[in-house]
Amino acid sequence: MRRTQPPSFATWMLEHLTPGERDEALTGDLLESFRSGRTSGWYWRQAFGACVAGWLNHLRERRSLLVFAVIWSLLAPVWIAVQDRIENGSLVSGQMWRMDGPFSGFSSYALWLVLNLSFIWVGMLLYFVSHPNFTQSFSKRKVIRAFALTAPMFLFAYFGTFVLMNLYFFPGPQIDRRTITPTGEITDLRMWADVLRVPYFVTLLCSLWETKRRSRNTATTVADVKDTDSAVLCGATDLVSRPDQWNVKPFFGFMVGAGLLNALMAALLLCRLPGAHTPSLASLFVRALIYLAVCICAGLGSAWFYWNRPASPFRADPPISFGIFVLICAPAWVWAPSAMLLYAQKSPLVVLVAMLGAALLAIGMRNTMPIAPIPAEPILSSRQPEERDIFAESLCVAPIELHGYFVAICIYAASYSLYESWILTAGGLCAVGAFLFTWKWGLTPSHAFNSKRAALRLTSVALPAILLTVWALLEGVSHRNESAAMSAAAAGGDGSRQKPNSRASGRAPGAYESVILWPGPEKTQIILQLPQQTSLLAPGKSRPLIIRFNGPYWYLQPPDNRPGPKAHQACGTPLAVSVESNSSIPLIMEAHQSLGRPISLAHCREIQVEIENRDNRPGAISMAVLLTDSALPKKPTLYLGQQPVVSSEARRYSSNSFSTHETLRFSVPAGTTIREFDEITVMLLPDMERSLVGPKIAIEQFVLLAR
Amino acid sequence: MPERSYLGEFELMILLAVIHLGEEAYGVPISRELERHRGRDVSLGSVYAALERLEAKSLVVSTLGDPTPERGGKAKRYFRVTKQGLRQVHETRRVLTKLWQILPDFK
């Protein structure tokens, strides 16, 4: 007896495991065939085949997305390295993100999420604009949904991956990021690097999966066939649903934003202070001109790129010429170098510059753009009053001015940001406020803008921008020289002390950006007055020169190579104090001995470093020695090599040992790049596993052997 | 990324079957037609996948019929070739014929 019903699980598979919309026609066809005499085995095969074919078709439609997600997630480790720098405040000031008190944890997580999402959003934007006709290929609603979906999707993928990986591969990756280059990060295909990429890949894939407009026409019903019959065999393209057109105005805004962002990025990356301590005014002027030109080129390049994209609505029918567009935007771009230079000095003038640039941009756009309607004056009488009878009087309802509320919020938030010294945030908020204010309530132009007037306007704006940039450069150089003098004074032991100011530095209470540890009870450096070198390391003398170590120990984190002006200074020995990193960035420990008088390298054969090791943590430590001639302009350094600290090696290490004395020998080469030295630097380089804690090793003395 | 404009072997067979079946072109007859001429079993899933690709290229259009009890209340999905589809079939035939003609006689 034959079955009349097909295997129910196979039917369930068909209905639930095929991708996309459930296709009941296929299920009906299979049922019809089954009832006409097909076997259960045939039905099972067909159900499996339908699932596989459906998924293959689905993936095939999204092959470009798959390829893009793989390529973009390959870059994720590089972004994580950049993110580490941003989070620790070396690239962007950490102050503006961090909050004290109970919100400190929240702000860290928010910053982490925003940074990660920025990477994904940039990827998504690239994916969208890389399509020739992205306005038609993607529906606006789904694009917005995709962007909104990234945050929960990333959190889910990240924590899922984190939990799984820690369950199976505890204790996690041991990657020395200091030694990895950006190219190395991209080409690193080890398992842990791939694990880092998984959340980004999953988020991109899941967010963008459904964004593509379904190219298949929705099947019409038989009743509709009568109406659409003529469409069949006479152009099915009519049945393709028309895409909703993106507005031209937002695209214009997008291009203005892209140009401005690119100019700001160029300024942030390229505008640097001159290397000279006392640069001439002419050189600063030339430098300012170059910076302005670079920013204009960056903004122009970005705008040109988007203007001429195949998907750009301006490519075929521009509302204004590209030249006019550039002339409108350039008065804002020219302020980018001065804004970034002032920002580097933490100057509140950034706010004024940002407001000025934004206002100029708004005036230009308002005066020129034919697509931008001139907003109506917010006069109460110009609006149709809505009358309501309340008691005996009729009340006139005030119109709601959303722009006004937004500007007010910007002003309040900017004031708070300024109070908290978040200069960049304040600048951004004030710029938005100034733009909105000028856009909404600026004066209506008496004459229409043309290219001649726009060029004249750019010239008149560029001149003060150049002057401001020159002034910012001068201020920057002066500020830098001042800082260098303060550092020199601190190194010279003038007694100036910096108390830990966690609020000002944006660090947690009790944490410091770097630490200087002086070994003696006195927090002053004693400059060793060496006898005449002719009597000690002169040729023919075999008596070694012994220098007791009395310099400071530096504890800092890369990319810093010296303690900052706010470094915490304390008195103690590394054997007794414990200095730890409060982040995942390794700690660098250096010991610096200033000799006071230069010693000729031609007379020195070997330098022995005698140390006391009281470190009882596992992990090998190496020592490197550098000699510096600080009298020469660029302070050239001679690297004497790296030696392992034998007492810290695994075979010698014992947690019970109290203290070990050891001597490390560094031979001085005969032919060197420098002739003499007056500073000895000892670097202690622990293994990665113990790099977050400063080694408990103290330098006792240096023994210099005559050649 | 531009869509592929030429027809695959399976897609061409399906288009021909749809043209041949005319008003009665839905999943079951199309797969039977293919089975009859190819002499082997055809997966309905792959037939539908190919039909969806053809529909995405606007070479066929589909309409839903009325649900029938013998199909468990599921509607049939009828496919009809478009003018563009017909043109594509003619073009493929022309190219294939030319290619066959330039081949030397072989046994």
Image (cartoon, coloured by chain):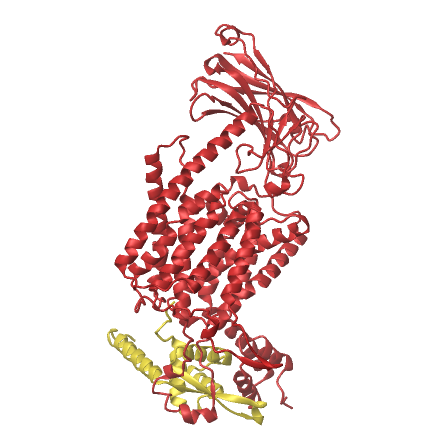
Chain colours: A red, B yellow
Residue for point 47% across, 22% down: A630
Number of numbered discs visible in the structure rendering: 0
For residue B55, above or below residue A404: below
The answer to whether A683 is drawn above or below residue A264 in the figure is above
Does the rendering let one see residue A194?
no
Q: Is residue A213 above or below residue A2?
A: above
Q: Quadrant of residue B19?
A: bottom left
Work out whether residue A80 or residue A334 is closer to the camera in this orientation and state it: A334
Image coords of residue A187 (percent x, y): 48, 48
Q: Which residue in the rendered view is the most extreme toward the right?
A: A656
Residue lying farthest front?
Answer: A392
**Residue A53: % across, % down:** 50, 74
In the rendered image, which quarter contains the N terminus of chain B?
Answer: bottom left
Indicate the position of residue A567 as horizontal and vertical percent values: 59, 33
Residue nearest the viewer, comparing A265 with A112: A265
Give residue A158's position: percent from left, percent from top: 60, 57
Which quarter of the picture shows residue A244?
bottom left
Q: Is residue A644 visible?
A: yes
Quadrant into which the C terminus of chain B falls: bottom left
